[in-house]
Amino acid sequence: MSRKTITASSVFFCMTLSAQAHADFLSDGKATLGMRNFYFNNDNRDGMAAPSKTEEWAQGFMLDFKSSYTGGMVGFGVDGLGLLGVTLDSGQGRHVGSSMMPSDSDNRAVDEWSRLGLTGKVKMSETEFRYGTLIPKLPILVANDGRVLPQTFEGGQITSNEFKGLTLTGGRINQATGRGSSDQTGLAVAGGTRESNQFDFAGAD
């Protein structure tokens, strides 16, 4: 009876510590809400470019949650990114070829569009691995943030600062979501005609 009681108490104690650790990494997290109002006007009526005019107006909302890490030698966490774009004005004939917002089946601007990205992360000492939705800012890959909502990528990235004065970075990107889209696509350079689902990178800084 005594042994069973001790075992049950030990299990309950471990479960309590685990629940507390998970609660701490969420409660110690940080959430920020960003808002961006964006007006775009590209007038080509004096030139030969088509369409002759692109004019649109939209409001963007970006909710960014970053958790802390669980305790222990290896810490775990999760980040979340919620993106919402709302069309304020985009009249007929002014949306053609736009990179501002998605189009519906009639090639008109949608009323709203959204994305949700989750990123799991693991940290040990000064090395962190992230997998899921990424917004990289690297010498060879920078997410485009020049419209209402930012471009995002899906993949994994590891960053290590174990050595003083040296940062090691590596990873693999599989898909991307454009700044004016809710759909994931393959990867391609500007003007490219073929897509890839694997982009590997590594470097030292």
Image (spheres, rainbow, N blue to C red):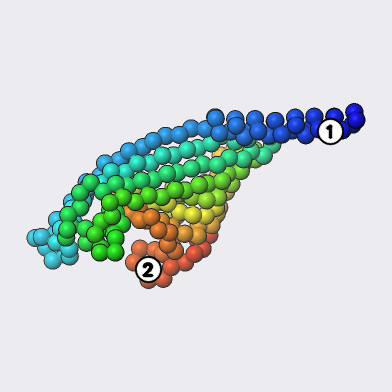
**Residue 70: x, y in percent?**
63, 35
Secondary structure found at label 2: loop
Check the image and name the residue furthest to the left: 46
- The disc labelled 1 sits on which kind of residue? Thr
**Residue 165: x, y in percent?**
56, 39
Q: Is residue 145 visible?
A: no
Q: Judge from the rendering whether residue 167 lies leftward or rightward of residue 139; answer left or right.
A: right
Q: Quadrant of residue 94?
A: bottom left
User: Closer to the camera, 4 or 164?
Assistant: 4
Q: Quadrant of residue 99?
A: bottom left
Foreground tag (1 vs 2)? 1
Among the two numbered marks 1 and 2 on one chain, the one whose residue lies closer to the N terminus = 1
Q: Report the residue at 26% width, 48% height from top.
A: 87
Relative to residue 158, is residue 164 depicted above or below? Answer: above
Q: How many marks?
A: 2
Q: Judge from the rendering whether residue 70 lies leftward or rightward of residue 85; answer left or right.
A: right
> Which numbered disc covers residue 7?
1
- The residue that label 2 is drawn on is 192
* Quadrant of the drawing holding the N terminus: top right
> Mark 1, residues whose alpha carbon is within 10 Å: few (<14), some, or many (≥20)?
few
Q: Are marks 1 and 2 in contact (CB under 8 Å)?
A: no
Q: Report the residue at 22% width, 61% height from top.
A: 96
Secondary structure found at label 1: helix
